[in-house]
């Protein structure tokens, strides 16, 4: 937690900009944004269908990201074995 003046000095951003961001992105606004997916006047079944659709979209996005991660891991393994170089960072090494 930091004041507007403190944040302004720390991040070298004008105070008015920080105050504007704080007004736009306050906790109440963020909490209301979570409930904005359901439109006013929506019935329970419509809201359920919307949520199910969103679940399917998120599931597909998760599967795609997992597939991409697997492809990148495989690419790193092949590069390490073919080129005989270490690409992955060693665990426990200290930063210089």
Image: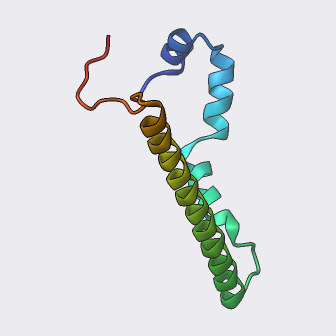
Examine the rendered structure and indicate whether residue 84 appears above or below residue 29: above
Residue drawn at x 63%, y 75% is: 56
* Residue positioned most to the bottom: 45
Residue 7's x, y, as percent?
51, 18
* Residue positioned most to the front: 82
Q: Quadrant of residue 45?
A: bottom right
User: How is the protein colored in the picture?
Assistant: rainbow
Nearest to the observer: residue 61 or residue 81: 81
* Residue positioned most to the left: 92
Q: Quadrant of residue 52?
A: bottom right
Nearest to the observer: residue 90 or residue 47: 90
Image-based side of 10 in relation to 15, left or right: left
Examine the rendered structure and indicate whether residue 22 appears above or below residue 72: above
Image quarter of the C terminus: top left
Residue drawn at x 63%, y 14% is: 13
Image quarter of the N terminus: top left
Examine the rendered structure and indicate whether residue 6 appears above or below residue 39: above
Residue drawn at x 76%, y 80% is: 41
How many numbered dots are placed on residues in this image? 0
Residue 60's x, y, as percent?
62, 68
Nearest to the observer: residue 76 or residue 29: 76
Residue drawn at x 50%, y 37% is: 79
Nearest to the observer: residue 72 or residue 45: 72
Residue 36's x, y, as percent?
68, 64
Examine the rendered structure and indicate whether residue 43 appears above or below residue 68: below
Residue 71's x, y, as percent?
55, 52
């Amino acid at each position: 937690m930091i004041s507007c003046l403190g944040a302004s000095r720390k991040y070298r951003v004008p105070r008015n900009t920080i105050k504007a961001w704080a007004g736009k992105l306050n906790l109440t606004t963020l909490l209301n944004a979570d409930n904005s997916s359901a439109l006013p006047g929506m019935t329970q079944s419509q809201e359920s269908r919307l949520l199910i659709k969103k679940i399917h979209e998120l599931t597909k996005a998760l599967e795609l990201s997992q597939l991409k991660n697997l492809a990148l891991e495989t690419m790193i393994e092949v590069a390490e074995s073919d080129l005989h170089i270490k690409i992955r960072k060693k665990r426990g090494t200290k930063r210089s």
